[in-house]
Image (spheres, rainbow, N blue to C red):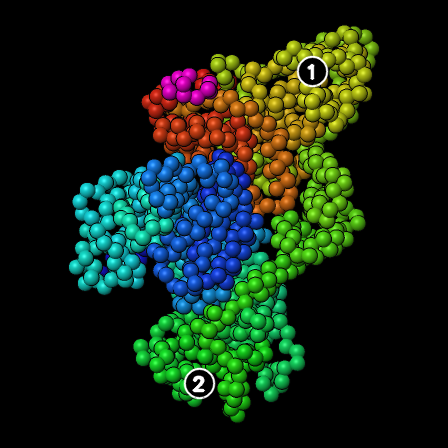
Amino acid sequence: MDLSSSSSGQRRRRRRRAHTAEEAAATLRKAWCRLRLSARDPARVLPWDAVVLTAASPEQAALYNRQLERARSLGRFPASTTAIAVPDPDGARIGSGAATLHAVASLVRHLAAQASKEDIAEFLPDANGCSVDESALAAAASFMAKKHVLLLHAGGDSKRVPWANPMGKAFLPLPYLAGDNPDGPVPLLFDHILVISSSARQAFNNQGGIFIMTGDVLPCFDASNLVLPEDAASIVTVPTTLDVAANHGVVVASKDGGIDQENYSLCLVDNLLQKPTVSELVEGHAILDDGRALLDTGIIAARGKAWQDLVTLAHSSSHTMIKELMTNDFSFLHFGTSAEVLDHLAGSYSGLVGRRHMCSLPETTACDIAATAIILSTKISSGVSVGEDSLVYDSVLCGRIRIGSQSIVVGVNISEFHGYSPQIINSRTCFTLPDRHCLWEVPLVNSAGRVLVYCGLHDNPKVSVKRDGTFCGKPWISFLEDLRIQDIDLWNSTSQDKCLWTARLFPVISLPEMLNVGMWLMGTACDPDGKIATLWRKSQRVSLEELHRAIDYNQLCADASKHQSDLAADIAKSCMNYGLLGRNLFQLCEQVLQKDTCLTLCEELLSMFPSHGDQYSGVLPQSREYQVKMDLLRASGDLSTACIVEEKVWASIASETAAAIKYGSKEPSSGSTYSTHGNLHPRKAFVELPVRVDFVGGWSDTPPWSLERPGCVLNMAISLEGSLPVGAMIETTDHLGVSIEDDAGRNVYIDDLASISSPFEESDPFRLVKSALIVTGILGHKILSKSGLNIRTWANVPRGSGLGTSSILAAAVVKGLFQVMEDDGSDDNVARAVLVVEQIMGTGGGWQDQIGGLYPGIKCTQSFPGQPLRLQVVPLLASPQLIQELEQRLLVVFTGQVRLAHQVLQKVVTRYLRRDNILISSIKRLAELAKIGREALMNGDIDELGSIMLEAWRLHQELDPFCSNKFVDELFAFADPYCSGYKLVGAGGGGFALLLAKNPSCAKELRQALDEPSTFDVKVYDWNIVMPR
């Protein structure tokens, strides 16, 4: 092979791996967003009606039911979703096919037991000569016809991942995207499977059905693009290389009658092959034209009539089902062995992995933990070392402990060694787990103690001694010879299958003794005098097989829950001790809520609060401090004090904003040109402004974010129906006092200027103008000592438009007042003043609305925190061609849905003050997208802008699930074939929508369709970009 072509190929593969990881991150984030939406707003984003897990035994089913309740409490699915684990009958291994039928039948009985008699009667058909059995089958099929079920096969004994046996392989830790939510619990494989499946729910539309997956595979693909055939059962598959196919199932597709589409193909299934050899693949016609084969991913869907047939089959003895095949491009992540688990954490997808999550670690000078090691839900003390690419989960490690590279430690508690015999363990030595080994700890039933278990990373417990099986990486023959162990020590009889699964290796003795014996068995400790071997032979020992049947699942769950609660409590206390700077204390405390000591902990944390507000002065904003205090007061039950502190939260934000803007109640201007004697010259200001539409970046402009972090917004000033819709007229009058009138015909006359003071009632229609009077300082200005003011405002925009009308109107009033005062009425100064106006009003908006209305054209505006807050408005030098194309392709549509930004803003600000990491990462991404969007427009790439709008809309729903509603979802679904992007403007929830068509022709077609009264009750506005004069 030519060296240069080989290197080129390697470079291509490296690029492909990086691209795949990036795609996987985007796919998972999008799916996580949808999952959270379905849990928060199930009426809009439909969830599964039921989630069912199969289990190998009643004990395992009980463990899974606890995990399902955990998932529900974490918001993985809503209260309306039924979640059950179904054990195989009588503990028999019945296979996945029979387990599916058994699970469906069990679900039918479960749902029927919960339903009312009226609900059941609705589905009971008239007998008409039918037998009772036939009538029951028909009723069951009808009852389940509209149900949408996720079934996950999670039974089995995980022989090839033995350390996952206690928890179940589906619930092994998988910290993909864990960094997005560092104060939340460790993500599990089950969580990610649930996430991917949630996007598949919409593929069923109005037809009921079942979506079947396996618990040891994460199919990383965008399931929202899945297309399922009606009234049919289908297998979801993907082409793969023959080496992968040889270790899994392979689907043989029919060569005739297939349907090929751009993203998938559909055809009948001819055959299914299990772990076929290459010759069997050839003979079975399973190899595709490109040399690959179709992998059986374990994903099966049955929809409509096929689903009803499956329900019927679950109650009867035989039935024939139609099988169809779909292909969809996705990554197939199989967690079938311990080595595969580490490979998925350290290989191509390593960039997705959170390597330190919910853990307590000493300073780096007191321990040695490799940068690539993954430490999850674990407490580590000084003296511990962990090697490269190792996984440590749900453990406590203290003392002199060495964990080698590429090793796995799960559920191990090595805390203190008191009372052990010095003849057994030498205090000068340390426990060592060699490279490429697994170590885990299991509680036994009937309080029989705990067992420390270990094996090599690549050991296959199912491979016998005769077939070159290994233990701790050594062939059995070498292991037995080296330690002088006889077969009879491990296996009862010659007829027993001699393998790691059945070998009675693991002693039930004290923890220090188990550690010492473990090192002897693993080959890291010597036994010159034979004492360790004697101890091992005399002790009661268990095999992996016996251990699997003797796990105390209740104790396992209790220990794990207590460990995680204690860990969260320790981290919360550290937060209080060292500054509250970045951790989500609210989320940490939620993880302790199950403990009886939760109230005590909250009171302890409150007692740790600084008595003076300046302990973290200059580092910790007071608003953040008050928010944490309010959350702790609520958790401890002191609701009355919490309400008082909540008022201080919002007052602090207002004062922090004023301090950053350097605006408050102004002193009278010494440089006034007005004389205190004689008549004053009347002055009049007339200000008209456009509204703004924002493409991306909103929320990054809002205090307190913009006071603490950089922000960036891409927006545009537009006219509506040929005019500038927002304005204010301000003129001096001969009579004292202030007269205010709005475009609704409401007016007020205020003769006592001292009565104009905040806070204002939310119902006060003139609080905007009153706040502007305070902020500009005109109430103390000499002009009002000899004359009065007449102020008239208007906004020819529907209420709740989302076009920034309130802030832009405030800008018009402030600018007019500055002009009357002959003060600094520059756009920059006005924009800053409006920020304070918003805080005094209590609406708490950001700077992007007034920037959007004050500065013409398209602009990318950045803010930089500091005192004062620095705003940098960068106009986009758009070509006439770009302006024309944008005006032709962009539809500005009023949805008719009224929205109140203030309600949305309070929720988002509260989450930010709590340091909600998902929210923080979402707003960071919005600001980043604003910069990318500017580059796209500068390059004339309007299609790229559409993609950015779609991602921004997804992120807005992540920030607040109620920023959309069913009407808006239906509008966007209708517009989707015509558009490259769409979103609601502003905070969402209603108001105006932007629909960016794929081209001018699509824009015309879409506008014509929306103008039809029978389509949607919306109004498409004529608009133009307001360009600089």
Please identify the quadrant where the N terminus is shown: bottom left
| Apparent side of residue 11 relative to residue 567 in the rendered image (left or right) | left
Mark 1 or mark 2: whose residue is earlier in sequence: 2
Q: Nearer the viewer, residue 411 or 1021?
A: 411
Foreground tag (1 vs 2):
2
Q: Judge the density around disc 1: few (<14), some (14-19), many (≥20) Cα neighbours within 10 Å.
A: many
Of helix, strand and loop, which one carries label 2? helix
Image position, residue 518 (x, y; %) = 51, 79
Residue in the image at 52% along x and 42% along y: 80
Q: Which residue is mark 1?
A: 820
Looking at the image, is 649 positioned above or below residue 394?
above
**Residue 976 vertical position relative to residue 439 in the rendered view, above or below:** above
Residue 356 x %, y %: 54, 59
Q: CA distance from mark 1 to mark 2?
A: 99 Å
Label 1 sits on a secondary structure element that is: helix
Of 78 and 109, the residue lying toward us? 109
**Which residues lie in the magenta part?**
1007-1019
Which residue was labeled with disc 2?
489
Which kind of residue does numbered mark 1 sit on? Val
Does residue 440 lie above or below 942 as drawn? Answer: below
Residue 220 visible somewhere in the drawing = no
Q: Are marks 1 and 2 in contact (CB under 8 Å)?
A: no
